[in-house]
Image (spheres, rainbow, N blue to C red):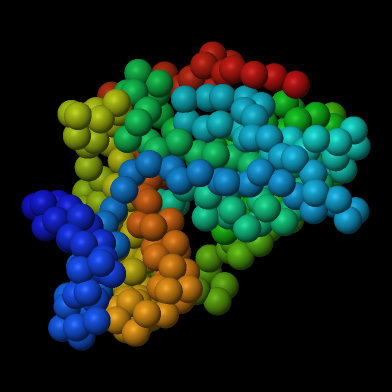
């Protein structure tokens, strides 16, 4: 419903800033232009932004980087940041969260790690774009993906999970070690991901235990609209997850938008650009497969594609 107003604001804001018209010198019009900019920024998208990592500094040299898919499934692309050098360093698989945002939120991590490592990252697909025929994707499938990706990369690689994937990364490592799989990671790093949520519970943990698990499935799960490739797939919509994120730090986000408005009015271009860049990334949301909710009970259980079918690539 707000799309026409936001689209008008997006197109009108540059006109008010046009120095040839001389209007930007008038404070009321500067404020109006800034208000349009704020309204235009508060817009959700459902497409992954680019990583935009073209080079890396290594040993005092600038090395070219190339993004290449090492393996592809309906739910994820194993993305390889290949360096243009003979010995790229030890391989590391960065497991990005599938929690309402895209893997590009880890752009700076992915930009820094190649200085010393051969970097791979899980580029999770938006569930709204995965056709229903591709089956379910829950914790089991998530763990299976990590195991298969480690096999694609090969023995001696390292595994680093950031936030939400700490549990499936730990499970994948344990299962591979038990099976004496040669691709078992040489090391496992879990960053900011609670393994036992009963210890030092956060606001999110407290919310999760405040209601029956069935409540979350009934209240937060919705079918993908007909105009999307994944029409009919039941998901936890990314915009609901984003709403939860915003409400956890509502005062902070409100202050940032207020400061963004002030920076635009006062002509603080660099500060405004930094805020704009952050929120364009933050407001790019991805839907999550409903099977992540333990209380979710599908009407018809589809066969999982992770039995070996649906995979492309190798190593």
Taking the spot 52% from the left edge, 32% from the top edge, the residue there is: 76
Taking the spot 72% from the left edge, 26% from the top edge, the residue there is: 152
Q: Is residue 215 visible?
A: no
Q: Please, is residue 255 above or below residue 69 in the view?
A: below
Nearest the camera: 218 or 118? 118
Q: How many marks?
A: 0
Q: Is residue 155 visible?
A: yes
Taking the spot 21% from the left edge, 62% from the top edge, the residue there is: 15
Q: Quadrant of the C terminus?
A: top right
Where, by quadrant of the figure, is residue 82 drawn? top right
Where, by quadrant of the figure, is residue 265 drawn? bottom left
Where, by quadrant of the figure, is residue 120 drawn? top right
Picture coordinates of residue 284, whole percent (x, y): 37, 51
Picture coordinates of residue 179, whole percent (x, y): 78, 30
Picture coordinates of residue 206, whole percent (x, y): 40, 72
Which residue is situated farthest in the top direction here? 309
Q: Please, is residue 243 above or below residue 67 in the view?
A: below
Picture coordinates of residue 160, whole percent (x, y): 70, 51
Nearest the camera: 252 or 153? 252
Left/right placement of residue 314 relative to residue 33 reads: right
Left/right placement of residue 95 relative to residue 99 reads: right
Taking the spot 33% from the left edge, 44% from the top edge, the residue there is: 46
Left/right placement of residue 309 relative to residue 19 reads: right
Q: Please, is residue 35 above or below residue 145 in the view?
A: below
Which residue is situated farthest in the front direction here? 20
């Amino acid at each position: 419903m707000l799309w026409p107003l936001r689209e008008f604001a997006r197109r009108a804001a540059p006109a008010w800033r046009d120095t040839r018209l001389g209007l930007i010198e008038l404070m009321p019009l500067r404020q109006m232009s800034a208000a349009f900019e704020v309204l235009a920024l508060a817009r959700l998208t459902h497409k992954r932004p680019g990583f935009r990592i073209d080079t890396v500094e290594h040993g005092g040299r600038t090395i070219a980087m190339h993004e290449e898919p090492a393996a592809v499934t309906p739910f994820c692309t194993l993305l390889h940041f290949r360096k243009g050098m003979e010995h790229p360093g030890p391989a590391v698989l960065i497991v990005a969260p599938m929690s309402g945002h895209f893997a590009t939120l880890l752009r700076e991590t992915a930009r820094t790690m190649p200085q010393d490592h051969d970097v791979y990252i899980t580029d999770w697909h938006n569930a709204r774009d995965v056709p229903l025929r591709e089956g379910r994707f829950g914790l089991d499938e998530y763990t299976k993906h990590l195991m298969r990706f480690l096999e694609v990369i090969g023995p001696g690689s390292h595994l680093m999970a950031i936030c939400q994937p700490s549990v499936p990364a730990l499970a994948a490592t344990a299962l591979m070690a038990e099976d004496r799989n040669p691709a078992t990671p040489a090391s496992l790093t879990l960053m900011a991901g609670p393994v036992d949520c009963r210890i030092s519970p956060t606001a999110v943990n407290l919310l999760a235990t405040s209601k029956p698990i069935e409540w979350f499935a009934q209240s937060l799960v919705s079918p993908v609209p007909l105009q999307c490739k994944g029409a009919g797939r039941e998901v936890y919509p990314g915009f609901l997850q984003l709403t939860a994120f915003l409400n956890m730090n509502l005062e902070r986000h409100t202050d940032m938008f207020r400061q963004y408005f002030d920076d635009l009015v006062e002509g603080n271009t660099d500060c405004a650009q930094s805020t704009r860049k952050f929120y364009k990334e933050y407001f790019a949301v991805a839907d999550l497969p409903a099977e992540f909710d333990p209380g979710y009970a599908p009407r018809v259980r589809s066969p999982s594609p992770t039995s070996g079918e649906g995979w492309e690539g190798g190593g």
